[in-house]
Image (spheres, grey):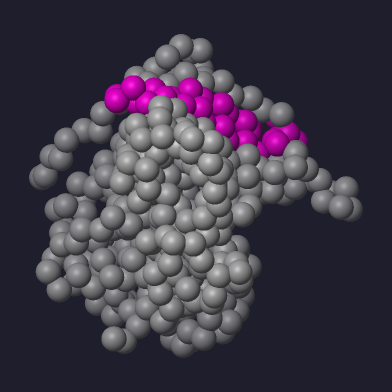
Amino acid sequence: MRPLALGFLGGAVNSAIGTAHRAAAQMDGHWQVVAGCFSRRPEVNAATGREFGVAPERVHPDWRALLAAEAGRLDAIAVLTPTPDHAPMVAACLEAGLPVICEKVLAATMQEAVALRELRERRNGFLAVTYNYSGYPMVRELRRLVQRGALGRLLHFQVEMPQEGCIRTEPSGLKPRPQSWQLQDGAVPTISLDLAVHLHQLLHYVAGAAPVQVAAMQGSHGWFPGFIDDVQALLRCADGLYGHAWFSKSALGHRNGLRLRLYGTEAAAEWEQAAPEELRLSHADGRREILDRAAPVAIAAQPRYGRFRPGHPAGFIEAFANLYADIALALRHWQATGQFASEEVFGAELAIEGLALLEAIQRAAGSLTWQAVEEAPSHVLA
């Protein structure tokens, strides 16, 4: 089949997120970036078009011009702009009839996400949010083990994503210089929108966990006074499962310490992004084992994940490419039938649940009390 035609809103050549999305989308031939408004800066916009091999006439000066010119010519548009811009841009894309792939997080508040869900329903649109960490084959293998009961009944968990970007200096001694929007906390702190959203999705994806109550503490320890850069939370789920979540940007020594640990009655499992090809299991009878793609595994050994033989580690971009392949399959099914169902592709519903949790964490940290996670409003179609 021909590659799906993809447009970019944001994602210029000088941005890490644009480089990641472009490489992941095109890795397996499912997508081709053919149009975009990559940057507000004309010189960067033009340079990105040249670097990406986009025809000059399809490099547009602003995002509204992109939508006006490309609606009906693109299979999907990827929204890769700063988080505060997501809601209005995603809404405009859906109104234009364009399927949307939105970089997490979908919106800055649950209310915005609910509005986008309703708009998608009214327009019968397609909306996918990228949570790339669940694209790792061993994460998908862990989900299968949980679903098969290999860990027994889940008892408790730990999820964490510590980083050091707000407190570490460059080798030259220079302090970090984030973009201004990244240092502006709103109703939900930027760190939660940036990091905690991944922890929520992984808990949902792997363990089927849905927190209903939270207690939390947060602090500001790095180079930016008043900016929240460390959050620790206790999470209670409806089925008695509970655990701890930690996400930070003031944890020296952690470049990106994403880790998931699940403890059950029959076994415990641990996966960390620093060693993404390995899944460590500890069994109730004392056995310990390490699984990788060469082990007798059902998911991670599938040909789609074997771009090269085990022992040649796949990483972040490959995991992202796995997700883009899933989105391509879901979109083609939606194009053919007007609907899709996928265990790998998530849209507004999970985004709403995640934002409800993040808002509860913020309330809990502010009050130092347990807070309930609000249920998402039901669908109300106009």
Tell me which residue sits at (37%, 48%) in the image. Answer: 145
Q: Is residue 45 left or right of residue 360?
A: right
Q: Is residue 55 left or right of residue 223?
A: left
* Vertical arrangement, residue 63 with respect to residue 366, above or below: below
Tell me which residue sits at (27%, 44%) in the image. Answer: 349
Residue extending farthest to the front is: 285
* Magenta span includes 86: no
Span colored in magenta:
222-251
Residue extending farthest to the right is: 172
Tell me which residue sits at (31%, 53%) in the image. Answer: 346
Residue 115 in the image: state x and y as whole percent.
26, 43
Total labels drawn: 0
* Vertical arrangement, residue 166 with respect to residue 60, above or below: above
> Is residue 32 visible to the viewer in this orientation of the structure?
no
Q: Nearer the viewer, residue 265 or 209?
A: 265
Residue 194 in the image: state x and y as whole percent.
52, 44
* Vertical arrangement, residue 350 with respect to residue 100, above or below: above
Residue 363 in the image: state x and y as whole percent.
44, 20
* Vertical arrangement, residue 211 with respect to residue 194, above or below: above
Q: Is residue 113 left or right of residue 178?
A: left
> Is residue 123 visible to the viewer in this orientation of the structure?
yes
Tell me which residue sits at (48%, 84%) in the image. Answer: 54
The quarter of the displayed image where residue 335 is located: bottom left
The quarter of the displayed image where residue 190 is located: top right
The quarter of the displayed image where residue 74 is located: bottom left
Q: Nearer the viewer, residue 12 or 149?
A: 149
On-image quarter of the N terminus: bottom left
Residue 238 in the image: state x and y as whole percent.
29, 24
On-image quarter of the C terminus: top left
